[in-house]
Amino acid sequence: MFLIKLILMSMIVFLPFNSMAAIMANNPELNAAVLNAVVQVMKECYEVRHLSGTHLAKCTLDIMHQSEFYNPGNYRVFLTGDVPGNSTLVISNESGYVLTCAVSANQKLRVSNCISNQKYPLTKGQELSITPP
């Protein structure tokens, strides 16, 4: 039984904050680039290295930190659900931009049905950080 129920498997990408975060929130090209970068790293960890569960989260986080992922919008990445199986990928930034995608992880990792919206930004007290083991 390789299905691991993950309550909150978060790959929180805390990289240097840039004062242009508010400008970047409304930049569709940057948002698409961030999504593509995250998905490519997840595919590397899942399809090539055959990692799942919290190991997938740790691998993704490690690769993004090692590659010095340029993160001007201070994007954070959260993955919840079963890996392998169905899960939800949420990418957000401090200005309140949120992108939510359905992720299907069986033989291959597939991201679909992405919905983006602008919400009120969270204050530091409202943010909760949980790092994978």
Image (cartoon, rainbow, N blue to C red):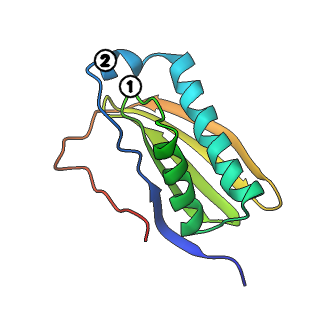
Marker count (numbered): 2
**Looking at this view, is 64 or 109 the one in front?**
64
Which residue is most to the bottom?
1
Reading the image, the residue beneath label 2 is 20
In the image as oriented, which residue stretches furthest toward the left?
125
* Circles 1, 2 touching at the beta carbon (< 8 Å): yes
Residue at the spot 67% in from the left edge and 76% down from the top edge: 3
**Residue 37, position as x, y percentages in the image:** 60, 35
Q: Amino acid at mark 2?
A: Met
Q: Is residue 54 above or below residue 110?
A: below
Quadrant housing the C terminus: bottom left
| Local SS, label 1 | loop
The quarter of the picture where residue 114 lies is top right
Please name whichever residue, 75 or 7, is drawn nearer the observer in this view of the structure: 75
In-front residue for pair 64/21 = 64
Mark 1, residues whose alpha carbon is within 10 Å: few (<14), some, or many (≥20)?
A: some
| Residue 22, percent from left and from top | 31, 20
In the picture shown, does residue 9 fall above or below 3?
A: above
Q: Residue at x 71, y 79 (%)?
A: 2
Q: Is residue 13 left or right of residue 84?
A: left
Q: Which mark is residue 72?
A: 1
